[in-house]
Amino acid sequence: MARMHSASQFVSAIAIAAALAFTGTQPAAAAQPAPAEAIKPAPVADLVNRVTIPYESFTLPNGLRVLVNTDRKAPVVAVSVWYAVGSKNEPKGKTGFAHLFEHLMFNGSEHAPGDFFEPLQQVGATDMNGTTWFDRTNYFETVPTAALDRTLMLESDRMGYLLGAVTQEKLDNQRSVVQNEKRQGDNQPFGMVEYEELETLYPSGHPYHHSTIGSMDDLNSASLEDVKGWFRDHYGPNNAILVLAGDIDLATAKAKVAKWFGAIPAGPAVQPVSVPVPTLPAPVSKTIKDQIATTRIYRVWTTPGLDNPEYLPLQMAGAVLGGLASSRLDDALVRQQQLAVSVSASTSIFAQGGQFEVFADVKPGTDPAKVSAALDAEVARFLAQGPTQDELERAATTFAAGQIRALESVGGGSGKAPTLAEGLLYQHDAGAYRKELDAAAALTPAQVRDVTRKWLSRPTFALTVEPGTRTEGGEHRGGFLTDPKSPSARPAFWRDPRFADGSASGAGASAPDRSELPPVGQLSPLVFPKIERATLPNGMKVYFARRADVPAVSVRVSFDAGYAADPKNALGTEALLLKLMNEGTTTLDSSAFARARERLGASISGSANPDTTSFQLDAVTPNLAASLGLLADYIQHPALDARELERVRAQQLTAISGEMKDPTSLAFRVLYPTLYGPQHPYGIPATGTGDPAVVARLSRDDLATFHKRWFRPDTASVFVVGDTTLAEVTKLLEKSFGAWKAPAEPAPVKNFAVPVPVQKPRIILIDRPASPQSVIMTGEVLDAKGTDDLLALRTANDIFGGNFLSRINTNLRETKGWSYGVSSGVVEREDRVPFRIIAPVQTDQTGPAIAELRKELTGFLGTKGVTADEIKWSTSGSARELPGMFETSRSVLDGVSSIIENKRPDNYYETLAGRYGSMTAQQADAAARAAISADKLVYVVVGDAAKVRPQLEALGLPVESLAIDSNVGSK
């Protein structure tokens, strides 16, 4: 269960490189599509007009503002509660309080003293989480309609009746969890960058100067009374917004919200915080070192926030400069000059301020000074010229298409409920999302140029991060005041004296019975969409499910290939091929291909897992025909330009080097080859990026041969879900793919008959000096296939480590506070599946954590098997969450492909509720004991060996040291 503290961005930066002319061996030929420049997409205004969230609103006498959106497509309701309090409200010495308190809100309330997740797990809630950021804290879950009363009781109980349940023990535990969350973030490559940016751009004491995670010292100093005061001052209903979206109407919402929230008294008025947008008095340059693959060069400025309309032109500028796949920086630094392996420009917009960030990852072997000069030159050129009208239209189309897809979900982090709440909280208008889209579509190049010039002509913070050993960790970063000589730029902490004793004005409503949780009503069963089928004359099999809730269609063309199809002497072939395919087609170079996608509002990408290679299209319905033509060109006619191969090769080698320096990625690279053995198809690094020595020598012909061999129409499965019909999409597919013919030779197959080595329990230690945490990863290969019936085994895993409420997460996170989160899984594979545990833990508890994991697994497989309570919450939750699991077209697409690829009946998901209902603890125990062996686990530990090795040696297992060369691999 992750609890994030991150900002949403307008357009994610995508580093895509280019292909120019075609040379050499060509993949299998087929008819060429019409030139992309001739495509006539739907006007941006037409897409914007399709983005709408009808809502109604009311306010309780205690000040709680409520928004209601009715969406009957699934029997679920999204519940989203937003409090107008974030880290900007924290006083000196109390950094991290908002986020720490968010954690405490999940540890029970006066009338529901247990873990907040447990009763929601039992009713089948999905999208459960809480997040904290500078300006707000939010809590959300999507629940079956019949469980809405229970959910509202729980949310209202922690809003109005929390303090009696907050204890010193809970505070101490969650303090440790949050500190491990901080360590986990600090332990990542570039983990110090946020501290550097905030502490440089904003003066000491400024509300945005300190990170949301806070400082270790301030977290340590938090007292029980401090925490209770924070609740009294900020968590009143008059400082909150409640959104209900989904299977509900206004009358029902009014009755239920009044019942559960009406008697909660209003809290003190939270005083507004002054948040000026500062300007650096002069340019600032700084260089730091970190365990990274290549030098990264940043340029960062402060910007206005959502309270100033100039934020929007800056967002558009970020998209054009370095956010779109066709961006200025991609074209100049990555494609043309080939100085950088990736670039980005983006805005992080807060309620009252924000940041404009540009960065470039230096191509290894290139002088960083040259990259720095080129980066500055492109920014200066943009400030002088501004964007073109075409660039703005593509940015607006990309934005509108993204909103259409996001709003298919009623809740979560980006669906209808959070969109309405964010608009009302930050801009005092729940319909702000639509006004933003209209404004984006109406912007002119001159407006974007002038606003960008105004804000980016100010002094910049130039940060360079070089490969090397850190000189400072994050233990003492994130605090309120880093310069004791700098005066505070914000008011002192304020508390209304009228409420100092905890009293408050009542709302005049009668309190409901909270002595027990409300019962759950009759739950609606899952109705999975009908799977329709067709076969094209060239053998392509089409599987279709209709979902017409939003004007969008998702298409996935899948091949039985995946990273396991890489030749054993050429690991990394498919990953390099997929990168090169992104560089254009035989008729479109990389920039033209990117521009075509953006004009259509289409997302097109290739990806792979160990078993399957897929090419995904997410299109808006008005542009479906042209988007499918672009997808077909991408799959059938990649340019595979030999002149671009070297640049893409450098990107993949840099990515491999980055994996060697990232603790989790490094553990993955070691674990699977160890478990499966190097000759097994699955005995490869999990990312598929391969062996750097191989990647360095692969030729264009190697890639073309793989493409021709593994991507062929007679082995393709086309999955389509969305706002169209089987007849219409089959006609469009025939037009786009019909001329593609299969080669004469038989289709290739992977050899899964390779024996898996018998393992002995041991520890493989990889030294990563100065790591504040150790990453523990362990597993074994099971004698079971992904196509087997693994429902009972997966249920047992859910109880052991697959759920927030699981045994190992409860032990290492919720009880001991050694980790931010621990999990286990039976990993998806077509053939032999692995059982895996991942546990990032604080360094000084590495050995004890492994001891606890071993004890937990031995007990689980022995005398401490599944209990009656555990089988109840696991199976009840798994059955009841089914309707919420398939709310979006993308989730239905995943479900359809899983049914087909795992050879299951079309009604597979509709049968699961009954199977869960009849499952016993004994069946789950038997499945786990038959499959998993506690004495076959191999542990991979990535951490500071000097501090960790003595702990590991005390466990009595053999400890093997594995040296890693970040440019070559293990040795």
Image (spheres, rainbow, N blue to C red):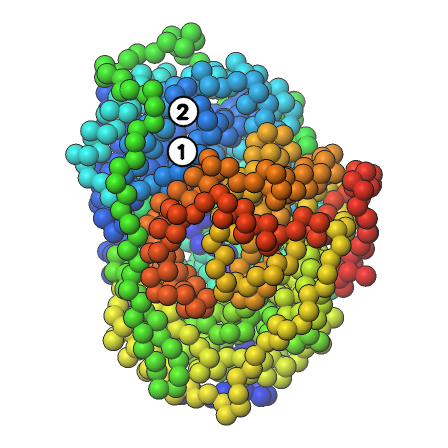
Q: Nearer the viewer, residue 568 or 953?
A: 953
> Which mark sits nearer the N-terminus, 2 or 1?
2
Q: Nearer the viewer, residue 55 or 599?
A: 55
**Residue for badge 1:** 119
Which amino acid, by three-letter code, is at mark 1? Pro
Judged left or right of residue 953, residue 397 is left
Residue 515: percent from left, percent from top: 34, 20
Q: Residue at x 70, y 71 (%)?
A: 679
Judged left or right of residue 917, residue 476 is right
In this view, 105 is above or below 631: above
Quadrant where the image shows the C terminus: bottom right
Residue 202: percent from left, percent from top: 56, 33
Which amino acid, by three-letter code, is at mark 2? Ala
Residue 112 disc label: 2
Residue 280: percent from left, percent from top: 57, 37
Q: Residue at x 31, y 16 (%)?
A: 265
Q: Is residue 336 visible?
A: no
SS at mark 1 in the image: helix
Judged left or right of residue 169, residue 250 is left
In this view, 101 is above or below 183: above
SS at mark 2 in the image: loop
